[in-house]
Image (tube, grey):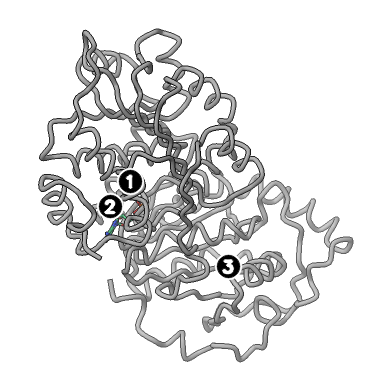
């Protein structure tokens, strides 16, 4: 299967080739013909599958090959709704890149930045609008955007949008669109809520589901590093320095934890920044740009903040703490080894997290190899503590974590997670994948 056989114009093919893609990914091969035929689409695809080009390329094709409706001002013809600001900016960048040989204009409309430049941009020609729901509604309220000529609507990461509480905003926006239009809905998961949304939105949609990365992520090398919660930061520093890891995306459970960890790593001589919802848009954009360019060695992020990050060939993802929801582990490690490149996902697991680890292994249907770093062996006398408010003591930050630890000690006996005390993480055999893995070359030597 080649891009040329999908019916895309010369101009679009040229941009795709320049981007370095040799053949369409499965979601692209299936979605592009459906969208070109004008039908509605319900697609099950995660970030990392190439879904963005899956809807962007055919939309560019459709809009460039048909005349806009007669109107006094060229109207907005396609609306792409995206849950997070980073992702919106990245999708619009892709639209611009794939459409660089076409005469179509696109625009990013996100919150957290001054609205006035957006108002000015809307006064000019915008064919494709990529927006987060909140800011779009701000414009609707100020009557600075006209959605009455939308021909194609995309809801990207619809499950995330619902998770983030955007359902009412989406419904308000849908009510402003023309009844006659093409609808494309992308979602990584299909809850009842998503099904209900799809039922109300889509007309006889084509259904496409590409393999979830959790089932097929063979290219991601996953490892568990057992360690006591208090030694996690030292172990992470050791691993990064020992293996000379660059472009490391580290997940923490909380914003506070991300900040503390970034601060600790900087003191240890590793350049790191935290990226999360409390940071200004400008700070987030700067951190991401420096990380992408390789200037910044480590980015510490919470799940929400990381959702929109699209960095191809990200070599290292580290779970400084395991997520509370096993599905999030899959989303996190999906950040590495994407679109055919290898990646490494390392999890630092303390005794408090054994149950979370078991949930993850049950979900991905495999045991993750355990690597014990000498000098960081868990102390068998340390008992499990409950994880309160997303924090445990391994997080750093003295003030809050001390009190959390006290609260935890009080309840530890009542909630025994300590059945595996003294054993390596996950309660699996101590020998599982131990030293040999550890002494292999660090990462990819980057
Ligand atoms: P997405 O799932 O849209 O976020 O895309 C994930 C990554 O795959 C992005 O970094 C894209 O640049 C890359 N990608 C998309 N399509 C292809 C393709 N056909 N071949 C290789 N890489 C691709």
Left or right: 376, with 240 as reference point? right
Identify the secondary structure beneath mark 2: helix
> Would you say the residues marked 2 and 1 are in contact, meaning their CB atoms lie under 8 Å apart?
yes
The residue under the point 47% across, 64% down is: 211
Residue 3, by quadrant, is: bottom left
Residue at x-position 48% and y-position 57%: 209
Name the residue that disc number 2 marks.
Answer: 292
Q: Return the residue at label 1.
A: 288
Q: Quadrant of residue 220?
A: bottom left
User: Which of the two residues, 10 or 319, is positioned nearer the viewer here?
Assistant: 10
Which residue is the site of mark 3? 231
Instruction: List x then y, in percent, for residue 373.
Output: 52, 81
Q: Is residue 175 visible?
A: yes
- In the displayed structure, 91 sits above or below 228; it is above
Ligand 1 position by quadrant: bottom left
Is 306 situated above or below 322? Answer: above
């Amino acid at each position: 299967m080649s891009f040329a056989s999908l019916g895309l114009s010369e101009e679009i093919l040229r941009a795709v080739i320049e981007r370095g893609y040799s053949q369409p990914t499965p979601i692209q091969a299936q979605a592009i013909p459906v969208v070109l035929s004008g039908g509605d689409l319900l697609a099950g695809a995660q970030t990392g599958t190439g879904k963005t080009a899956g809807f962007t390329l055919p939309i560019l094709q459709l809009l460039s090959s048909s005349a806009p409706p007669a109107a006094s001002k060229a109207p907005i013809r396609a609306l792409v709704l995206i849950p997070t600001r980073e992702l919106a900016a990245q999708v619009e960048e892709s639209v611009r890149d794939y459409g660089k040989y076409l005469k179509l204009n696109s625009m990013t409309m996100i919150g957290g930045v001054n609205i006035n430049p957006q108002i000015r941009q809307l006064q000019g020609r915008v064919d494709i609008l990529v927006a987060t729901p909140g800011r779009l509604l701000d414009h609707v309220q100020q009557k600075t955007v006209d959605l009455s000529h939308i021909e194609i609507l995309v809801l990207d990461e619809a499950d995330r949008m619902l998770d983030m509480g955007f359902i009412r905003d989406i419904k308000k926006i849908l009510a402003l669109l023309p009844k006659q239009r093409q609808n494309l809905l992308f979602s990584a998961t299909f809850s009842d809520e998503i099904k209900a949304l799809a039922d109300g939105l889509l007309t006889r949609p084509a259904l496409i589901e590409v393999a979830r990365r959790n089932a097929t992520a063979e290219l991601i090398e996953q490892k568990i590093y057992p360690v006591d919660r208090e030694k996690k930061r030292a172990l992470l520093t050791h691993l990064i320095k020992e293996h000379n890891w660059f472009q490391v995306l580290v997940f923490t459970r909380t914003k506070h934890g991300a900040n503390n960890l970034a601060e600790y790593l900087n003191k240890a001589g590793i350049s790191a920044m935290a990226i999360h919802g409390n940071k200004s848009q400008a700070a987030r954009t700067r951190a991401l740009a420096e990380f992408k360019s390789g200037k910044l060695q480590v980015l510490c992020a919470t799940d929400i903040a990381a959702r929109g990050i699209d960095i191809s060939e990200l070599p290292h993802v580290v779970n400084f703490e395991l997520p509370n929801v096993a599905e999030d582990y899959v989303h996190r490690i999906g950040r590495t080894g994407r679109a055919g490149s290898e990646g490494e996902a390392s999890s630092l697991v303390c005794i408090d997290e054994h149950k979370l680890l078991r949930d993850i292994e049950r979900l991905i249907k495999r045991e993750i190899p355990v690597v014990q770093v000498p000098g960081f062996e868990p102390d068998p006398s340390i008992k499990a503590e409950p994880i309160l408010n997303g924090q445990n003591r391994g997080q750093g930050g003295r003030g809050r974590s001390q009190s959390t630890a006290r609260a935890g000690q009080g309840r530890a006996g009542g909630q025994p997670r300590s059945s595996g005390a003294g054993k390596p993480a996950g309660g699996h055999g101590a020998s599982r994948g131990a030293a040999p893995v550890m002494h292999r070359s660090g990462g990819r030597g980057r």
